[in-house]
Image (tube, helix red, strand yellow):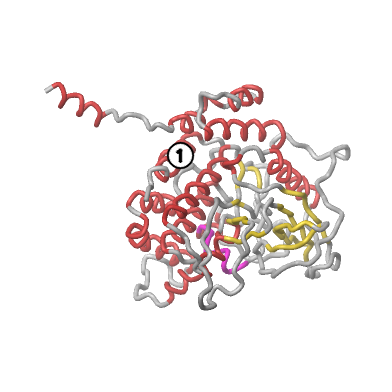
């Protein structure tokens, strides 16, 4: 009888997960000063996740959120030019050479009449955050060399006559890099355990960024980048050519449109690229514009939930081993007409199709992973118009981070 009572009690009050420290860290009690967070980051009694997140919070408080651009500050703007650019695909990072070093370049095009004082301060803040956080390994962002600015007609690369270009340069210790999108299109070897690892790594990166009130705004498989010293296969379809196996954890890049989650920060409209909209929540579909005063319009501002939806799209990609572009092609030949979506509403139709694919994801990745994917696609963790929503952060940690930690081969 005593044994039965204990079991009932355990079911009613389940024991906490072993990785509780991460949950505790996003508690409101840890809205601490910089020195307290620095102290916490150096403690050995906490897990790596906790100490890393404390370090990131301290970095954000001391060097990012309170950063003010002034003439006395050393600018992160680079004065050189890019040489030997690789294949440039609209809206995707590309490889180039800068001062003899191979770099990954993220391009940002803005209208000529943009308020560059505001924009450059935002980019300076971004570069400082990325570089100040390099000791936070689980954040998974590469070092940022700085940015190059080119007005129309400047630089060695072509620029439109109606827009200026900012190019953010990332560097890696390894010689080669490739994106998750590339892996899925080329159908390289991608083991189940490696897909779990990638999902966990990306989810933690998102939580880290959101914990310091930073929105990414460009989470998609082309911005998930692996680096390696291995020689990449040039012709993987060649007979007897050994299949290339993905190894290591990816980096998250593509911060060109990122910003602090603040009412004082405007939500820029991005250049419209059809493939990119597949990763955007239906409420954040952008249209091309040359008007610098226009933002997302009457559908509201970009939020953390919208980043989480983008993560959900990548979780589906990992689950079915197809890029979003191929998934959309499957939708077009599907027997279903998705009557619940408005007629002709492509984003809503695609979202409903992704939700239907969760059953296939479950067959490939298991029920825990599938449930996490469903919750990310629902994108309902954080409350609207609430900054520093600690309840949302705890829910994301509990229902996504901790659950992905249970996914095993």
**Image position of 84 with respect to 385: above or below:** below
Residue 144 vs 32, above or below: the answer is: below
Q: Residue furthest front?
A: 240
Question: Does the magenta portion include 276?
Answer: yes
Residue drawn at point x = 45 percent, y = 64 percent: 321
Q: At numbered mark 1, what does the secondary structure look like: helix, strand or loop?
A: helix
- Please state if 109 lies on the left or on the right of 23 as rendered: right
Closer to us: 341 or 281: 281
Location of residue 249 in the rendering, given as x and y in whole percent from the top left corner = 55, 50
The percent coordinates of residue 339 (x first, y second) are 36, 69
Residue 67 quadrant:
top right
Return the x and y of residue 105 as percentages of the image width and height. 71, 59
**Residue 360 among those drawn in magenta:** no
Residue 181 % position (x, y)? 55, 64
Q: Quadrant of residue 86?
A: bottom right
Query: Crowdedness of circle 1 by 10 Å Cα count: few (<14), some, many (20+)?
Result: many
Give the residue at x 70% y 31%: 62
Q: Residue 286: name its quadrant.
A: bottom right
Q: What residue span does the magenta drawing correspond to? A: 273-281
The residue to which callout 1 is attached is: 397
């Amino acid at each position: 009888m005593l044994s039965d009572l204990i079991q009932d009690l355990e079911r009613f009050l389940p024991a906490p997960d072993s990785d509780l420290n991460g949950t505790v860290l996003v508690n409101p009690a840890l809205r601490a000063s910089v020195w307290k967070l620095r102290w916490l980051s150096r403690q050995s009694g906490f897990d790596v996740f906790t100490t890393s997140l404390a370090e990131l919070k301290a970095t954000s408080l001391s060097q990012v959120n309170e950063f003010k651009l002034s003439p006395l500050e050393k600018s992160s703007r680079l004065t050189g030019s890019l040489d030997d650019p690789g294949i440039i695909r609209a809206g995707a990072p590309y490889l180039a050479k800068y001062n003899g070093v191979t770099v990954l370049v993220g391009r940002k095009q803005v209208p000529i009449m943009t308020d560059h004082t505001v924009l450059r301060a935002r980019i300076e803040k971004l570069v400082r955050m990325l570089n100040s956080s390099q000791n936070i390994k689980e954040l998974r962002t590469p070092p940022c060399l700085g940015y190059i600015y080119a007005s129309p007609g400047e630089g060695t690369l072509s620029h439109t006559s109606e827009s200026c270009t900012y190019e953010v340069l990332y560097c890696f210790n390894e010689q080669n890099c490739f994106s998750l999108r590339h892996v899925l299109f080329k159908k390289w070897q991608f083991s189940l355990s490696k897909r779990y690892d990638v999902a966990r790594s990306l989810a933690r990166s998102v939580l880290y960024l959101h914990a310091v009130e930073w929105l990414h705004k460009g989470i998609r498989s082309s911005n998930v980048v692996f680096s390696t010293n291995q020689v990449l296969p040039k012709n993987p379809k060649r007979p007897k050519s050994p299949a290339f196996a993905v190894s290591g954890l990816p980096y998250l890049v593509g911060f060109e449109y990122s910003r602090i989650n603040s009412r004082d920060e405007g939500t820029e409209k991005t250049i419209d690229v059809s493939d990119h909209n597949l990763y955007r929540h239906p409420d954040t579909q952008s249209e091309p514009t040359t008007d610098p005063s226009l933002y997302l319009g009457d559908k509201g501002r970009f939020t953390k939930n919208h980043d989480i939806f983008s993560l959900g799209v990548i979780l589906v990609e990992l689950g079915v081993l197809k890029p979003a572009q191929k998934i959309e092609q499957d939708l077009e030949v599907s027997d279903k007409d998705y009557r619940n979506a408005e007629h002709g509403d492509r984003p809503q139709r695609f979202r409903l199709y992704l939700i239907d694919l969760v059953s296939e994801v479950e067959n490939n990745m298991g029920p825990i992973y599938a449930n996490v994917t469903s919750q990310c696609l629902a994108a309902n963790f954080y409350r609207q118009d609430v900054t520093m929503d600690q309840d949302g952060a705890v829910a994301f940690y509990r229902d996504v981070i901790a659950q992905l930690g249970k996914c095993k081969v």
